[in-house]
Image (tube, helix red, strand yellow):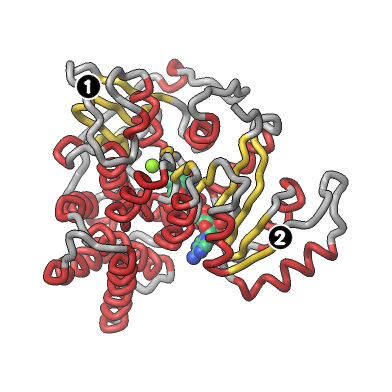
């Protein structure tokens, strides 16, 4: 086996991206960063290029390329930097980085369905993926799964819950790793329990949610993440999306995927096996651990990171989720069960509704109502076996519908 793994990071300036790069810095004998992509944060991207010296860099917003070039030329290369990276931009540029010849593993840290095409490029180039960008799998499961089968790429889950399940499955006879993400049920696996912290509003009453502001919704009690996923955690749509993600990753039907509220976020998820034994993975709520596991898999690396001490926590608690207070979970189960293009509509409507909330155009409690409306209208146009273009079409349509409703109501 090659000793240094070459990594490309899609969305390098985000929460997942920066944590991936911290790991690469911490383990220079294990990982070499060869590709980066970012949206618009040039200050951070320039620092990342200087630190990691990648071979290729893409900016999603190609209009910023001249500025990036001049900034890199102005800052004389540091001692370890032998030459400047190849620079590219736009969706073509993202696809080039995703399929870059020298890359062994692509970490997908782009937020939203914007990650779909680069993820497909990585799969088609036969790369292994550390999947953080769950929206891609949720929107396009029916396209992504056959592509994985064809190319032999492995989809390693970076989402903490799915990483927990994946880690538990490593020690499970019959749970064949190669089957991961092929949609074939893993024999011996009877039930998955996804844990949820409960998000920013776990101690709020339903009535109080009517007053929830952007600041309230973007302050997560346990995890430090990007804005969109933090709002998804507050609505519990994140857990709903993770139910669909688990369905596609592990091949279980929806009645065997459950949600448990666990406010301490120490148990990252559990599996129940055929004989009723339950396995769980535990750790501090820190995304570096599931990201590292994707990067080092199938090996484990020694880390100096803080070790879990359950005596410091004293008690772990659990309860059933409140589906009335948080309708997004049921919307996700329902879209997942319908399948086809419905999860793509759910996902796009959610992305747009969250964006409108962050722009203070709608109230927090309107988010699920908007998503429900889009899914309801889409029922008449449901496509049960969509191709990529059809998924992109409904993604576009659902965003339009939400924007129209918001415009009409304002
Ligand atoms: P973030 O907002 O912090 O970062 C997003 C990254 O994507 C940035 O680098 C940004 O420049 C880039 N980006 C944004 N829009 C883009 C576009 N249109 N085209 C190309 N690049 C674009 O988000 P995050 O919290 O790091 O989340 C990234 C993904 O990982 C999401 O799908 C999220 O659900 C998932 N995830 C995140 C966490 C976490 O702890 N942050 C945990 C589990 C899963
Ligand atoms: Mg998660």
- Residue at the spot 18% in from the left edge and 47% down from the top edge: 323
Q: In this view, does 193 lie above or below 34?
A: above
Determine crowd level at label 1: few under 14, some 14-19, many 20+ residues with C-alpha closer than 10 A.
Answer: some
In the structure shown, which secondary structural element does the residue marked by tag 1 occupy? strand
Q: Which of marks 2 and 1 is nearer the N terminus?
A: 2
Q: Within 8 Å: ligand 2 and the Cβ of disc 1?
A: no
Quarter of the picture containing the N terminus is top right
Residue 4 pos. (x, y %): 65, 33
Examine the image and state in which quarter residue 374 appears. Answer: bottom left
* Residue 365 showing in the rendered view: no
Examine the image and state in which quarter residue 156 appears. Answer: top left
Q: Give the tally of numbered discs.
A: 2
Residue 210 vs residue 100, the one in the foreground? 100
The label on residue 273 is 1
Quarter of the picture containing the C terminus is bottom left
In the structure shown, which secondary structural element does the residue marked by tag 2 occupy? strand
């Amino acid at each position: 086996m090659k000793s240094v793994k070459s990594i490309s990071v899609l969305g390098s300036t985000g929460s997942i991206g920066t944590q991936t790069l911290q790991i690469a810095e911490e383990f220079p004998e294990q990982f070499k960063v060869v590709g980066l992509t970012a949206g618009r944060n040039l200050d951070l991207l320039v620092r990342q290029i200087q630190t990691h010296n990648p071979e290729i860099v893409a900016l999603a917003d190609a209009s910023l390329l001249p500025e990036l070039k001049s900034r890199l030329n102005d800052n004389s290369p540091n001692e370890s930097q032998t030459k400047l990276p190849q620079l590219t931009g736009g969706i073509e540029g993202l696809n080039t980085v995703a399929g870059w010849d020298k890359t062994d593993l692509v970490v997908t840290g782009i937020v939203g369905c914007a990650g779909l095409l680069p993820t497909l490029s990585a799969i088609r180039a036969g790369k292994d993926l550390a999947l953080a960008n769950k929206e891609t799998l949720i929107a396009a499961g029916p396209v992504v799964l056959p592509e994985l089968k064809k190319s032999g790429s492995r989809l390693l889950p970076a989402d903490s819950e799915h990483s927990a399940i994946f880690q538990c499955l490593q020690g499970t006879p019959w749970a064949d790793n190669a089957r991961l993400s092929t949609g074939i049920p893993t024999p011996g696996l009877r039930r998955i329990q996804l844990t949820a912290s409960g998000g920013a509003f776990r101690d709020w009453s339903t009535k109080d949610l009517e007053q929830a502001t952007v600041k309230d919704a973007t302050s997560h009690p346990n995890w430090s993440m990007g804005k969109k996923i933090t709002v998804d955690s507050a609505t519990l749509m994140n857990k709903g999306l993770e139910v669909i993600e688990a369905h596609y990753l592990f091949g279980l039907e929806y009645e065997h995927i459950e949600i448990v509220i666990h406010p301490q976020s120490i148990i990252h998820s559990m599996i129940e096996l055929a004989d009723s034994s339950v396995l769980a993975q535990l750790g501090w709520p820190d995304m570096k651990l599931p990201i590292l596991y994707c990067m080092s898999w199938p090996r484990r690396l020694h880390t100096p990171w803080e070790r879990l001490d359950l005596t410091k926590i004293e008690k772990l608690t659990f309860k059933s989720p409140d589906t009335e207070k948080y309708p997004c979970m049921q919307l996700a189960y329902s879209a997942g069960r319908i399948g086809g293009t419905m999860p793509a509509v759910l996902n796009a409507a959610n992305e747009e509704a969250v964006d409108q909330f962050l722009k203070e155009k709608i109230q927090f409690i309107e988010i699920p109502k908007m998503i429900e409306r889009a899914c309801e209208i889409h029922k008449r146009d449901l496509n049960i076996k969509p191709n990529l273009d059809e998924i992109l079409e409904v993604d576009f349509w659902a965003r339009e519908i939400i924007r129209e409703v918001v415009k009409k109501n304002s």
